[in-house]
Image (cartoon, rainbow, N blue to C red):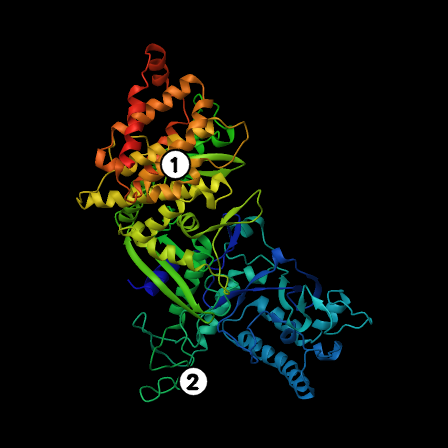
Amino acid sequence: MNWVSSLCALYDANAERAGQAERWKKKNLVLFPVGYDTMEAQIEIHIDQEGNYLGAHLLEKDEAETLVPYPEGRTSGLKALPLFDSLSYVAGDLLEVLTFYFPDAKNEKDKQSKIARLKGAFPLYLAGLKAWCDSPFSHPKVQAIYRYVTKQTVAQDLIRSQVLPMDENGIVSDKVKVQNTSLDKAFVRFRVFMHDKRLPEDILDNRDNAHDSAVWLDRSVQRSFINYYLSTFQAKDLCYMTGEYTPIAKTNPLKIRGKWDTKAKLISANDDTNFTYRGRFHTKEKETGYNEALSIGYVASQKAHNALKWIIRRQGFSRDGVCIVAWENALLDLPDFYASAADILSQVPENAADGVEVELEEEVLFEEDEAEVPETNYVSAKKFNAALDGYKAKLSGISRMVVLALDSATPGRLAITYYKELASSRYLRNLGQWHESCCWKHEYIQDKERKVYEGMASIREIALAIYGTEQGEDNNPQLKLSKNSDNKSPMLVAAFERLRPCIIDGAAIPRDMVRAAVLKASNPLAYKAKFNYHKVLHIACSMVKRLYWEKQQRNEREGVILGMELDKTNRDRSYLYGRMLAVAERVERSTYEKGETRITNAERYMQAFSRSPFRTWKIIWNNLQPYMKQLKPSAREYYKNLLGEITELFAYEDRISNELLDGKYLIGYDCQRMDLRRWPKEQISSQEGTNVSQKRTNEGHQDDQEGEE
């Protein structure tokens, strides 16, 4: 299926929702009927079924969104909407009752042009409304609105109800604004109160909202307009999307990514003056919408665009220039591929019912800084995999997943940059594989508590770690991405583009992104907040783990499955040097006073250490001696023996080499760092039962110095 067919199928499968307002995740959501859109109304007028005025009031912002017939886009020219419109169209007495100064008019000619525009607006609106009322598809509520506006008392009624305010001179003029909108552009909607008597059970059984005075929510009015508007098409042509002969769309809808997206179109071919296709095709015909280059059916266009708007608002990600949405053909709730493991688990109802598994702190080693070890709520990879299994159990044999991404190079053009259909089972399998192959312990803050989950971070968090910088106040710096003049974040867009195939298709992780993550994690001095640095470090570990997992899948010599727990048998040079760096950091930090947060020598030299480990280790070791002397004897003995054990695992050539460390040194560093947070009980018993000799350790460090010399 192509993207139009997929969206039309989505619309048809949810056609009963069309025009019905619903609450979804604490926000209003509606699938637009064919030929409908939303507008922000400022004024609401109440009338009865005879067209008599009952009252009016101003609308607050949270109640202003109104579903209106909007069959075609309109530009700067005069073009009335079929039912609701701005005051300049609805009020036939506007010029008579209000005083217009036209303060923004450039000259007298411009002023006369604006007056002519106001004079022509109401007759255009009235003619369109009359045509609907005279058609076989008329509706009593539409007829009531027509009866009222023909009286041409709208402006007078609004003044009498004190809806239109006066200026400083006591005159109702265009100098004042209505809800921060110029008076003539204030949008008007209607409520029609019918006299018919309905029993309570009739109201409850009526799914069309025909009993509701809110005309914009009455689905019988919506059907009336759709049938009327489709009857106005005179000619039919071939729809290139469906292959059927149907009425052709003259224009295509806007506001695809949100109500702010008022310019960008997915399909645009309105060139009837510049003759882009001269020599190949005739130009487009304004009246019929016919175009030899491309013709799209009106209903197909409306269904596809309205379904896309609805699904983006329902479950899409739209932020900083990224707009992406994924859905299952039966609208089953499946996890978002771009979300973190924690976000995915938070959306599983069963997870909330199970409660949160709490990991208790073990005894802290040598006066660990309490700020370093949070009380965490811990969510394991096992729990995440169980959640994915729960999703898989709900799938049918024909369940399909659709992933679609949008972007706009210019304000007026929108493009589909990615479209893919795949079996939902394959989607979940690849998603699970991504989180398993990148599985690491990541921290986040929720309700002022630091929590931990196993899996992979979100694409946005990955982009922040690789390309972000700390910004904000010194006491609370945040990782942020740079934005361009269009308020887009190019690096976030790039991260989505490049990591999406890794997650959905199982493609290889970009090597340059892994290198960038390792370089960022090798520079802790760039971060004021430890929490931010630890996020960068853990994401770098995830990406390094994925890289070597891929190599192992391809049976390459360097391929290896790296675990989250400390591997005391791992003899990899980079891994061992990372362990040594973590021990050096731990030794120095153990001597700090409570609350002391200054940089350790290990952190200060970390970047140089990653480039030249053997040479830099001598500097770190020499700087570490004063701190070793401050330790308790048992702690000093433990650390010296631990460094001796790590040193013995090296091959001599590896230990004295000054070659660059690869990303595995971060794995060793983080695993050893996390292991040293706890007092190992087996080490306590061995220290109490045995008088451990320092000779082996001292000899090992002497060899280090001799080898360098």
Along the line of sight, which residue is nearer the eye, 121 or 459? 459
Left or right of 673, for residue 529: right
Calculate the distance from the C-alpha at mark 1 to the C-alpha at mark 2.
74 Å
> Where is 331 relative to 588, above or below?
below
- Local secondary structure at mark 2: loop
Residue pictured at 68% horizontal, 81% vertical: 105
Left or right of 655, for residue 411: right
Along the line of sight, which residue is nearer the eye, 348 or 245? 348
> Where is 279 relative to 621, above or below?
below
Percent coordinates x, y for residue 386 in the rendering: 33, 35
CB within 8 Å, label 1 to label 2 = no
Q: How many C-alpha atoms fall within 10 Å of the one at disc 1: few (<14), some, or many (≥20)?
A: some
Task: Check the picture and name the quadrant holding the C terminus.
Answer: top left
**Can you identify the residue that label 1 sits on?**
619
Residue pictured at 40% horizontal, 62% vertical: 406
Residue type (three-letter) at the residue carrying disc 2: Asp
Residue 272 — which label? Answer: 2
- Local secondary structure at mark 1: helix
Percent coordinates x, y for residue 214 in the rendering: 59, 60
> Where is 268 relative to 209, above or below?
below
